[in-house]
Amino acid sequence: MSPAAKPGPDESARLGLRLTLPAQVLVLFISVFPLLMQLYISLTDWSPLSGLAWPRAWEMWNTFANYTDLLSDNRLWSALGRTLLVMAICVPVEFLLGLGLAILFADNFPGKRLLYSILIMPMMVVPAVAGYMFYMLFQSGGPANDLLSAISGIPVTVAWLSDPTLALAAVMVADIWQWTPLMFLILLAGLVGVPQDQVKAATLLGANAWQRFVTIVLPRMSAIIIIALAIRVIECFKIFDTLFIMTGGGPGVATETISVYIYKITTQDLIWGYVAAIALAILIVLSVACVWAMKRMAK
Amino acid sequence: MSAIRLENLVKRFGAFTALKTMDLAVDDGEFMALLGPSGCGKSTTMNMIAGMERPSEGRILFGDRDMAGVAMGQRGVGFVFQNYAIFTHMSVRQNLSYGLRMGGRPKAEVAQRTGAIADLLQLGDLLDRPAAGLSVNILQRVAIGRSAVMEPAIFLLDEPLSNVDAAFRAVMRTELKQLQRQFRQTMVYVTHDQLEAMTMADRIAVMDHGVLQQVGRPLEIYNDPANLFVARFIGSPGMNLLAGLPLETAAGPVVDLGAIGHSPVLAPAQAAAARRARGAVVYGFRPEQVATVPPGHGMAMPVSFVERIGARTILHLGHGAQGAKAVFENDVGLSPGSMAHLAPIPAAIRLFDAETGVALRGT
């Protein structure tokens, strides 16, 4: 075989680059182009009602006016606060419930397979359908009140979704119902992966069940716990579909989260330059926060 | 310090019986090796002693105390796992002090005892290193130290040398034996490697298919195997075992070995054993305990293969059921195809009942 017929390392690298180039350009287009477009629009007062095509948005250039506006947008800040509140309650509850279930399911018991299937079912329900389900559950004459009446013995007729506080609670119940299974699945995988020899070794050294859990099982699961929490924190921040169908962000703005607020100003107020600025600001803040949190937790 | 007594111990997993009625007494401070091929029940026995498995029948006693219902954390047993089960998310110090910390000992005591065990095992310089990424020989010492710091009365080791390479195994054998002398604890050591058992153990319990075959000092087991399994399993190569029939000749009692001819005349003890046989016997002798003799004396066997491994020469003789091996210190000048004339050393001959496989003894 002549030396020329055999591709050198440089040549094969170049071939690889040429073969993957179209795909890379496509990925670049999908991920980077919209971001650049968003950045561009966010620096203008452009709106679809302005009569200009978006590439000509520079005619309405306002530099950082949108960004200074959002700092004083009270509706935005309360939506952000509400989103963080939902996150601060839902994610820990989902985590603790999921962990408890995972510990339960790490052992064998009769009916485990059936219960397992039932438990992960909520995750597979389409969020919009889950929204309608909980919308009906929480009607004043609905099953939620019936159940509470049966337990307490007093007829309960709470209008869940019309009360600002209770509506937010109902939305959180729906989120916890739907997403605890995901937490449970991920944590169960982590729990099953804990080396049993180490647990046995700890037992033989006299550690009790709680000590084993804290000193062996949890540290061994830390990586997967971080992943599970990160997934849920990010998803929870974007909470929208179930909530929107249940309350539409109402009553008033009582359940208006960041996503609902952005949706409303996009479809109702049509101030797209401002929307782009909000979305970009959130993306930056969330990315920085995520990287910081994961670095901290990895230690 | 504690002796271990196993009484009528049985372990079943569903329909499978892993251990069939085992009785064994390990003396206080003794190093007992449980030796056998994989699946012989040795690890199951060990796990039951540690409390990881519950016996299906029978009792386990430490001293006079019945261990039934005593949880594995309360047995005061040190256990070294085959893969060491080191807590790799901790430092060496945290590994060594784990049991003491979990037991809620005062900080000063934890530090003092951890330091002492680290010095003993030459781990002093490594105390603050993360356990992940340490070499196997250090991990092994950490695993031993982590159990030893609890000063358990009984130490159980589950094939601790099976993960290390052959050269290092030789070093560790010596090291382990020295450690046992220092700790003076009762040790039970599970292994499938007869060399480990022979060099380290005070006594060996040979097991096969869930049945205890023989218990004895290493040389007893080597010289006087209780049955054909032990004869074949111990020694490298194992004992030569030839099918034969006891025969009285004018010269004295011999064993008729068929095509090979007659064995040399049996010594009095072996002759007495032969007379106890009811029919066919198995004629056994160690490959090392053979001498070459002039043609016409002893057994004539064709040489099929010659292994020359430096210090020793191993002759492969005969075929199949009448095959044997002979080990010589020097080259004997025989090549494949030639006839070897051999006679086992009379005192080294062992006879077994061909039907039951049990050793026949003269007295």
Image: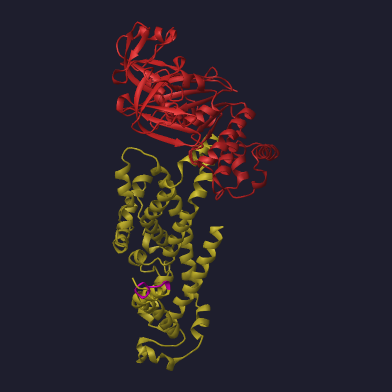
Q: Position of residue B83 (x, y in %)?
A: 49, 41
Q: Position of residue A199 (x, y in %)?
A: 49, 40
Instruction: Report the residue at 43% width, 25% height from top.
Output: B287
Q: Quadrant of residue B207?
A: top left
Judge whether residue A6 is colored magenta.
yes
Q: Position of residue A146 (x, y in %)?
A: 32, 50
Q: Position of residue B357 (x, y in %)?
A: 35, 18
Colour of chain B, in one word, is red
Q: Is residue B96 above or below residue A226?
A: above
Is B290 situated left or right of B186 in this image? left
Q: Identify the residue at the far top of this view.
A: B250
Instruction: Report the residue at 46% width, 70% height from top.
Output: A79
Instruction: Report the residue at 49% width, 76% height from top.
Output: A281
Answer whether residue B57 is visible to the viewer in this image.
Answer: no
The chosen color scheme is: by chain
Q: Quadrant of residue A44?
A: bottom left
Relative depth, front residue between B313 and B352: B313
Relative depth, front residue between A107 and B226: B226
Q: Is residue B21 above or below residue B304?
A: above
Q: Quadrant of the N terminus of chain B?
A: top right
Answer whether residue A44 is visible to the viewer in this image.
Answer: yes
Judge whether residue A61 is colored magenta.
no
User: In yellow, which chain?
Assistant: A
Q: Quadrant of the C terminus of chain B?
A: top left
Q: Which residues are magenta?
A: A3-9
Q: Is residue B255 above or below residue B188?
A: above
